[in-house]
Image (cartoon, rainbow, N blue to C red):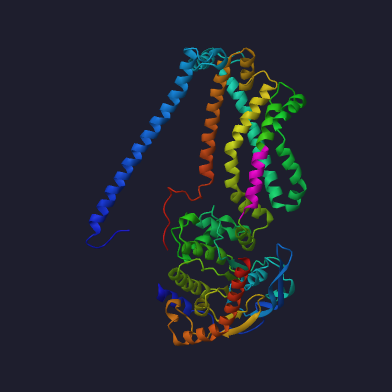
Amino acid sequence: MSVANGIGAPVISSTSEMVSAARAELRRRRILVNALRVLVLVVIIGGWELATRIGWVDPFFWGQPSRIWSQIWTWIREGTAEGPLLTQILVTLEEAVLGFLIGVALGVVFGVILGRNRFLADVFGPYIKAANSIPRVVLGSIFAIGFGFLGIQSKVALAVVLVFFIVFFNAFQGVREVDRNLLANARILGANQWRITTAVILPSALTWIIASLHTSFSFALVGAVVGEFLGSVEGLGEMIKVAQANFNANGVFATMAILAVVALTAETIITWLENRLIRWRPNATGEGTLSL
Amino acid sequence: MVSMMESAQDARRAPRLSSSPTIELRGVTKQFRTPSGGVYTALRDLSLSIQPGEFVAVVGPTGSGKSTTLGLIAGLERATGGEVFVMGQPVQGVNPRVGFVFQTDAVFPWKSVLGNVTSGPQFRGVRSQEAQRRARDWIARVGLAGFEDRYPHQLSGGMRKRVALAQTLINEPQILLMDEPFSALDVQTRILMGNELLNLWSSTSASVVFVTHDLEEAIALADRVIVLTAGPATVKGSYPIDLPRPRNVTEIRFDPRFVELYHTIWEDLRSEVMISYERAKQQGDGQS
């Protein structure tokens, strides 16, 4: 708001000074935070390296950062025992992504159906809660027996089961939380049950569903890796298993680092997707409110 | 802007002939189950009828079942006893000729202004292009041209109400139900929206039932003000408002006839407000 009298000008100039001072302060703070972040990394990795070099910690059992790095480098140049590194990453990624997509689709569909139908929710509720409380990773063994050790089916199935429950509960809750006024408005505007589901319930629950995607992709990765652990001939989980069998601690850590990179990349993609899909949501940096 | 509005209101229809009522409630009772298992009676033996093209304001103390009455007419809820007729037919579910403007924001936050206004026709199977053409027209009529691509959170409360009006009016309802539509707005905006509403209404032939707790607003807008008793609600009085149209909501409250009407209706309303107030106080005492 501009001031239209004599004291207007000095007020504005001092405001702009305040703004630039605040910006400088913000910049200083950002530099400090980034510098400290690097420092934390250096202390942890450097401390680990140092502790193994001077013999406080045995690098044979607990690994050593420099050897982990050279292990990754070797895999990149010469490939792994199972084949080229990229192939291993792609195998695990394929299982995780397939499991993720199927799990999300099933979770959303069942979440919306049970969220909209109180009768079905009452019937299935106890079983879903019971199934959620058991450690589902154990199902990996069943899938390995049922679908065979070699194919990707058993790994995908495990990832699906892990992802399903997270997405299901979020979708279910999201549907239950839909504003009753919005539902009444849609009914009066002329929406039938199907249009209410697609035009009101789904967009409204989308905030909840998308929030669950962040956690569920890492669970899909866990499903794929554990599935490979339980029986396979390729993939990152198989590499961990081989490294463990050979007492190659550096190999285990190296695979972990690769998995972390994969997970972080997926997280970035999901965040991008989130920002695209829920553009309508008010955010702090968006344009201000317009007056009448 | 005011003069434009008044000329539009001048072009209003000829005096209405009272034929069969658009809305008729006969001895309606509505009871709810309370969470503790008891029964709460919101409406008891409520009868009223509204003529075609009539603008009726319903006032009553807080919790007097004003919103419940609208819910019954809209077909969102069913009466426990008595009969509700809309255009001569008993109400069974949502009627496509009824429009409803809610007290709280009920526009879809994930849709742009254009998307929101287009919703009604699209739900009703109008082709997308045709729906958009009509939506742009209505957006302009409520004064939001240029804001088609904004999302509701980017608009002020008054602008969101304009979106809600356009969203409802695009369906060309013959009955417009409004549940304290402007109560969340500041006083100045509320008066402006009142003028806007009269202006929009004058170009339609819709009957309006306008629920409010603000007696000034009720008299300024309506052809008739109905006073409800403290719950369980029934009709206490019905007052024809003989103020000339077109009206300017900003000015009309200084009209001597307005003041006179206000005094008369307030005498009737005050006792009900006091009953409701005493009850609320007793409940508060009982809880503490």
Q: Quadrant of the C terminus of chain B?
A: bottom right
Taking the image as shown, residue B48 lies to the left or right of residue A3, namely right
Pick the front one: B220 or B6: B220
Q: Quadrant of the N terminus of chain B?
A: bottom left
**Residue B207 seen in render:** no
In the displayed structure, B129 sits above or below B99; it is above
Pick the front one: B21 or B28: B28
Q: Is residue B199 magenta?
A: no
In the displayed structure, A69 sits above or below A206; it is above
The image shows residue B276 at horizontal and vertical percentages of 60, 75
The image shows residue B48 at horizontal and vertical percentages of 66, 80
**Residue B102 seen in render:** yes
The image shows residue B76 at horizontal and vertical percentages of 67, 65
Residue extending furthest left? A6
How many numbered markers are drawn? 0
Residue appearing at x 74%, y 71% in the figure: B80
Magenta segment: A164-178
Pick the front one: B87 or A140: A140
Residue appearing at x 62%, y 28% in the figure: A94
Determine the main secondary structure of the stretch shown in magenta.
Answer: helix
Taking the image as shown, residue A224 lies to the left or right of residue B107, namely right
The image shows residue A215 at horizontal and vertical percentages of 59, 36
Q: Is residue A176 magenta?
A: yes
Pick the front one: A60 or B210: A60
Residue appearing at x 42%, y 51% in the figure: A287
Residue extending furthest front? B288
